[in-house]
Amino acid sequence: MVEEVLFRQAFQAANVGIGMLDINNRWLKVNPAFCEMVGYSEEELLYMTDEAITFPDDLKHEAELKDKLFKKEIKNLHIEKRYIHKDRSILWVSLHISMVFNENDQPQCFIIHAEDITMKRQTEQTIVENEQTYRLIAEQSADIVGRYYPDGTIFYCSPSVREILGYEPCEVINKTPYDYVHPDDQHKLAACHNQVTNTNKEKTCARFRTKDNTFVWLESIIKSIKDPTTDQPKEMIAFSRDVTTRVTAEHELKKSKQRLEQLFKHIKRSLDGVTDSFITVDKNFCFTFINKEAEQVLNHSRTKLIGKNLWSTFPELVGTNFDLKLHQAFAERCAIQSEFYFPTLDDWFHFRIYPTEEGALIYFLNITKRKQIETKLSESEERYRSLVEFSPESIVVHINQKVVYINPAGVALLGATDPSDVIGKRIWDFFPEENHDVLYQSFRQNLNGNHKQRFTGHQVTTLDGETKHIEFTTKRIMYEGKPAVKAILRDVSERKKYEELMSKSEKLSLVGQLAAGVAHEVRNPLTSIKGFVQIFQASKSYNDEFARIILDELDRVESIIYEFLTLAKPNQEMVFKKLDLKLLLEQVVTLLDTQAMFRDHQIFTDFDELPFVECEENQLKQVFVNIIQNALEAMSSKGAVYIKLKRHSEETISIDITDTGRGMSDERIRQLGEPFYSNKEKGTGLGLMVCFKIIEHHNGNIHFSSKVGKGTTVTITLPIKQNKHAYELISQ
């Protein structure tokens, strides 16, 4: 009877969730710890099934394992799965499930033991993320970095191999990892080696022999680098880290879980089956029960401790947090949990106190390893913060649009004297109000995982009133436990001035080259006009047909002069408008027809009917004139330029400009767009560089394909729509 009472008290007071399920997965009994874990009361759970609170993706796997329990293929099982809390949040639990059979050997019910491991999962995930960030920022890694030929032969190894494995880098050159891996792990390394050629990146963990003939565990991330011309692996890079301590801890954890599973199997037989250290004390703080786990932790025989006073036996506990909370639980008659440091054992413990009529039930668990992990996490965060503080890039972290952190480089960029001048301000306050919508779209696009993260250009007004051109990119992070956005800003004011001067220079160069052709084209219609006027003067009469021809020729002159003046306009602020690219290209062709005829060339067009495109008219004209003129100059005689306007995809259009000129080699194509590189004798290369920059500002791209002796095709791809508020509608 006493054992049954103690069992009921232990079931109710256990700090791990315990429950019973019938064979149809309906809850028969749950303890308070399980109710607290999932957020439902016992009354609510007794009307529910286990499936109702299980994350859908975990149902199938659990059902398959339970079926094996039914068939007695396994005696018990351990899984990690997700429960859906009453507040709809997701929590991870470690479950130990065993099957109870009746006297007829028929399945009767399931016994469930659940431990909340959400914090552990989150802590492990946070450590991984911080380590990844630290590796990216650190200039020198303590991990082993190795480079291999596709057959596995090592041709480079970083000096850290000396610290981890004891070899000098030169000792491992021209050898393979198979010369050092543990024989039992050869198959894992071979499988990873074969797989990385297909997936480009693989991860493995194996034991490697040190110079003193011991073995350490190395976790390696292996990446395959392919030859762009053959698409075949030309080398592999591996980053290897010593994880011996972690693997050893995992093995120990695995062993601990196995022991825990055994203890749960016997929970009905004895209170010694409780995994935590468990003691009971009376109102005078004298021991009344101690389980085996507590006996081992306290390093005292429980037979000698029963009846003795807690404080006189362990006086070092007086004045600790455990002392304070135990007296509080007695005074307030409520369950209390907390942590304390046990000086004698040099360990940290998590404890739960449940007051009873006779005294109190106390569970305590050694959490020293968790504390060590938290300490390492804190140290990792401190290293990351130091790197950010001394970074030359301006880094700003904001939550709900308000700045919560800025590094010294950011303070200088924004014209402040101290971080406090910026912290608390809205990030939008540094950008012109009329650009807020565009800025918001840029933020959303950078933060959207479906888009490639990139730097976008904007203007900021500093605290001292100066206007600066910047580029920035953003990324979601966790800051002090809260979702935040990290922005990296670069001051590109000087580069912006250089680009504007370069664009003006190139445009003036184009205008000068076109001047001769335009003058000749204007002279032809003027000759016709002069002749008909002389006829009118001689005949003293008016002729409608002659007047129509004169007006047509004047329209021709006006069109050519308009296009010439449009191209000669100085750079203005980019304003996107909805335009008909077909009309724009026809205007450019009109401008260049004269030059084509001079060179005995022809320009052919094939334009599909397409929707209007959001673009900046003058800048695109500059691109088309530059590229078509290059095409004309690439042909010696009687050549042709073909211009094709078509739909590229649902959201983009493309313009193909093909010539029948001399073509280019792949090496020359790779150098196109670099300043001062040109295929022309007197070219500067700045024209194509400006074209690349203009198309980049339009969120498009330029692609060159060419065959020597056959010609070149330039494909320009542009989005039909820019950012929602990045253009100005044409007035009616």
Image (spheres, grey):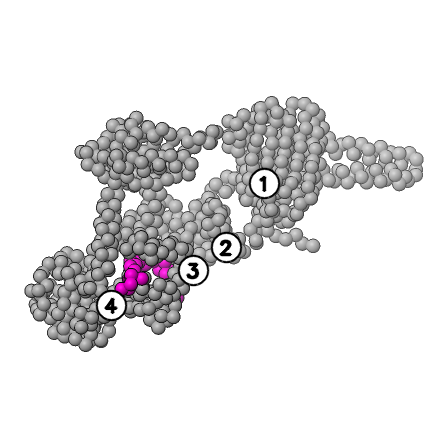
Label 2 and label 4: CA atoms lie apart by 55 Å
Q: Secondary structure at mark 2?
A: helix
Camera-near label (1 vs 3) is 1
Q: Nearer the viewer, mark 2 or mark 1?
A: 1
Alpha carbon separation for disc pair 2 and 1: 25 Å
Specify whether residue 339 is in view.
no
Choose the circle earlier in sequence order: 2 or 1.
2
Compared with 85, 463 (above or below) is: above
Q: Nearer the viewer, mark 1 or mark 4?
A: 4
Q: Residue at x 60, y 46 (%)?
A: 650
Q: Is residue 355 above or below residue 238?
A: below
Q: Which residue is mark 2?
A: 440
Q: Say which mark, if any, is on residue 11.
A: 4
| Residue 85 magenta | yes
- Which residue appears at 34% of the width and 46% of the height? 132
Instruction: Please tell me which residue lies in front, 340 or 278.
Output: 278
Q: Quick check: 424 left or right of 308? A: right
**In the structure shown, which secondary structural element does the residue marked by tag 1 occupy?**
strand
Using the image, tell me which numbered label, if any, was put on residue 717.
Answer: 1
Q: Nearer the viewer, residue 456 or 20?
A: 20
Badge 2 crowding class, 10 Å Cα cut-off, few under 14, some 14 to 19, many 20 or more, is some
- Cα–Cα gap, marks 1 and 4: 69 Å
Which quadrant of the figure has residue 314? bottom left
Sequence-wise, the earlier of marks 2 and 3 is 3
Residue 697 percent across, percent down from the top left: 54, 44
Q: Check contact, mark 2 vs mark 3: CB within 8 A.
A: no
